[in-house]
Image (cartoon, helix red, strand yellow):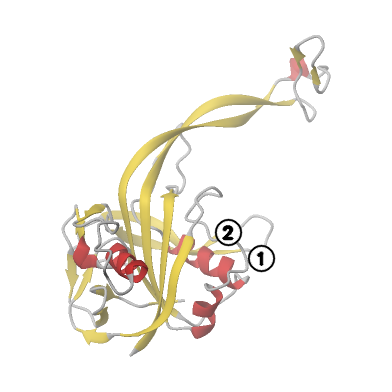
Amino acid sequence: MKLYRILISAPTASFRYPNVMVNYQLSLKAIPYTTVLGMIASATGRHDLSGFHFSYTFRYETLYTDIETIYKIKRDEKKSGVDIGFDYKAGTQHYLRQKAHFPNADAFRREVLYGCYLTLYVDSETIAKAFRCPMYQLLMGRSGDLAKVHSVQEVAVTKTSDVTLQGTLVENPSFTIPGELLLLPKRFSYESTIRQPVDTRPFALMDGRGHFKLHPDYIEEDSVDVAYEKLLRKFDLRNWEFQRKEVVLNLNGFIDEELKTHILLRYV
């Protein structure tokens, strides 16, 4: 069988836990379906695509906590008469208000994944070609998590009856699958002004954290194609050590022999 393989990386990524509203925002340890479909929408310029299959493996090297400034809206009727703007000569600050609502700055901690790599497979040639010249900037989470496409190519994959999964999510998991259980939407609907979650269901998350066995930059200079060899070492799972134990499922899937990546196709 032939699929299209897209190799993507990003320095940072952060995938917000749904329905968590606290001053310390954790990140999912694998990219959710909604973000993958969001990247496909950015590449193609369409958010209503359907009728295709995809699979992916997400990896990251480490994580850290960043501190951001957020602005909360506070209601205070007593300040409703305060002027708008900032008086630079007097050095006094006034609040920008809408009736009796005022912004209030606060510190916010966010967990960020560092050194991220995404191996994406699709069965649509149209979608694959769109990643060669994306319509919009590709993001791995937030607006600052800029992603880079390294390669888009057609690859031949072979069938397998045992699929080894790491750094991904599995929908509607059985209780025999180890991993963090989460209730997540499969996609978002943009028919209204505020996007709405669609097809929310349980997922099992396999943490993609790990490290390179041999860093991709440590390569012999006399190689025929140094750039391509470095690229393969970045995405070849034989050169990656996952921290968490792999999950083996007795399901019909495929394997990319070149990168030793198992493929479990999901339908959209």
Seen from this angle, which residue lies furthest bottom?
A: 1
Give the crowd class for mark 1: few <14, some 14-19, many >=20 residues within 10 Å. few
Label for residue 196? 2
C-alpha gap between disc 1 and disc 2: 8 Å
The residue that appears at 19% across and 67% down in the rendered structure is 238
- State the SS at label 2: strand
The residue pinned by badge 1 equals 191
Quadrant housing residue 182: bottom left
Q: Nearer the viewer, residue 101 or 53?
A: 53
132 lies left or right of 159: right
Give the crowd class for mark 2: few <14, some 14-19, many >=20 residues within 10 Å. few
Q: Is residue 199 visible?
A: no
Quadrant housing residue 175: bottom left
Seen from this angle, which residue lies furthest front?
A: 222
Q: Is residue 201 above or below residue 60?
A: below
Residue 253 x %, y % = 26, 81
Residue 196 x %, y % = 58, 59
Q: Nearer the viewer, residue 261 or 132?
A: 132
Q: Is the C-beta separation of discs 1 and 2 under 8 Å?
A: yes
Q: Is residue 246 visible?
A: yes
169 lies left or right of 199: left
Give, as a three-letter code, the residue at label 1: Glu
